[in-house]
Image: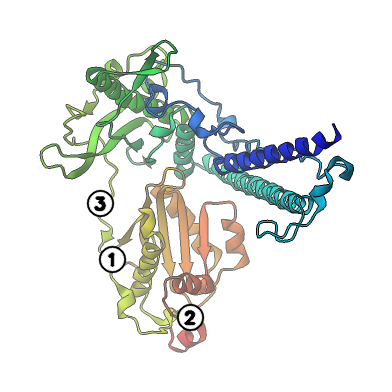
Amino acid sequence: MAREAYKALGYKWKDYERDLKAVRADLEHFSYSAFIESDNVAGVPPSWGPKPSSLSTRLFLLPRDLELIPLSTLLQPIDVPQLPNVPEQPALSVSKSAYPDWYFTPLGDKFFAGKSHYEYEAQQRQTIVDSSVKLQQLIEEKRQQFEQMRSAAAKEYEDIKRGVVNGDVGAIQKIILIAHQRHSLPKFLRGEYWVAIDLDSQVALVQFKFPDYSDAKFVIGYSGRRADKPKYATPIQAKKYVKLCLYSLIIRSAYLAASFSVRDKVKSIAVNVEQDWHDTATGQPRSGMIASVQAPAEYLRSLDLSKLDPEACFRHLKGIATPSLQNVSAIRPIFVLNKNDERFVASQQVDGQLEPEANLAAIPWEDFEHLVAQLFEWEFQQKGIEVRVTRASRDRGVDAVLFDPDPLRGGKYVLQAKRYTRTVDVAAVRDLYGTLMNEGANRGILITTSTYGPDAYEFAKDKPISLVDGPNLILMLQRHGKKYRIDLEEARRLNIE
């Protein structure tokens, strides 16, 4: 029996190595978002979950219960998921008396390289031990990463709470976005989604992208002796499901926006739906709006999503939609956020006109504003952010506006550029904050060739304001290969303020 012990130990180590590989594979699938409930389940590979084509993973259909999450809970980051643990390690060895004598005889072949069976297996086990130590480090690194993400989200939530108290429209927009993410929705439908609030009309506009279901097949049940044969929806059934999904998502979005908007800021909710498709006549890709609705926020809050028929509700709200989701044609939305502000002008490519090593503190102020706008275009061109320059004026209201479609950080940003040779005082930051409120923007960004005083930083610290001074401006430009300089003394000698 003693000699069976080393064999049993060998099996345990093979099982241990297999379990380590399983945990490592499991860990790779773990993700965390402070805004979205996670589907992470330790020890359950993703392939064991619902089939991708099932109704529950591809569609959202009303009627169904949609219990609103309290605002106090909504503005708390989701807890970090429980990560898998490293399995318990077997004993490294058993008593040498349990091994046969030949186990300790050195072997000269290439495989064992002069080692005995005992030495070779000890080396293999040490390799597995090293692997388990590294796996534990990876688990801890991921846990720390998730905790840092949660801490950053907690700070962002505090900023949102302060913003709501101060009447910041950007904070209200973020609450609506977070409500969209936190309330039940299949992953397949968590695509592009953004919110904007027009203060003049008191309208909150929600826009999202609806998937192209033209080739989708839906499993609606199973048959066969072992109930393992999928039963697919017919084309007519699939067509009906997709149409109901569209109407259901529109009503869901309008209902959540109405429920989580500040009532004295928003009186009406508009929802526009965008889609990418292929033209059946030409095969060419197309995109455009396929549905639109607008309704009073108070009325939307009164809806009972557990009992209504989504198509009847959409029609009652006088929504408009493309006649066919199989042969799509774009529609004109009911409400569109005005980006065609008369202040906007074409941006100038100032960078190509400036001399290398030009002193930015001494260039014309109009050129400086356009250069800063160019810089932000370089910074965000891969993220779909649109930068619009306003007409040149010395009133220092808004020098550029950024429109960001991202569902979490997105919205409207106002940008001011100040080519100064003296310290920027707190009055300029106060002016920016006033502009931020008037524009209904998410954030204000102030960029200068100079520096900011302590009172400016103190005023900005609890507000959605970013301050970029001269040294940081140069660093940002250097990231894009631009070699300019800032020499305030030289600019002052030229009598530039």
Left or right: where 433 falls relative to 157: left
Q: Give the CA distance from mark 3 to mark 1.
A: 14 Å
Q: Is residue 127 visible?
A: yes
Left or right: where 394 falls relative to 49: left
Label 2 crowd bin: few (<14), some (14–19), many (20+), radius 10 Å? many
Q: Give the CA distance from mark 2 to mark 3.
A: 34 Å
In the image, residue 377 above or below residue 144: below
Tell me which numbered mark, 2 or 3, is placed earlier along the sequence. Answer: 3
**Residue type beneath disc 2:** Ile
The residue wearing badge 3 is 340
Residues at circles 2 and 1 in contact by the CB criterion of under 8 Å: no
The residue wearing badge 2 is 486
Left or right: where 190 falls relative to 285: right
Residue 347: give its label.
1
Tell me which numbered mark, 3 or 1, is placed earlier along the sequence. Answer: 3
Question: Horizontal and vertical percent for residue 207?
Answer: 33, 37
Question: Looking at the figure, which quarter contains the C terminus?
Answer: bottom left
* Disc 2 secondary structure class: loop
* Disc 3 secondary structure class: loop
Label 1 crowd bin: few (<14), some (14–19), many (20+), radius 10 Å? some
Tell me which numbered mark, 2 or 1, is placed earlier along the sequence. Answer: 1
Question: Horizontal and vertical percent for residue 341?
Answer: 27, 52
Left or right: where 364 falls relative to 85: left
Q: Is residue 85 visible?
A: no
**Residue type beneath disc 3:** Asn
Question: Looking at the figure, which quarter contains the N terminus?
Answer: top right
Residues at circles 2 and 3 in contact by the CB criterion of under 8 Å: no
Q: Nearer the viewer, residue 3 or 417?
A: 3
Q: Nearer the viewer, residue 443 or 252?
A: 252
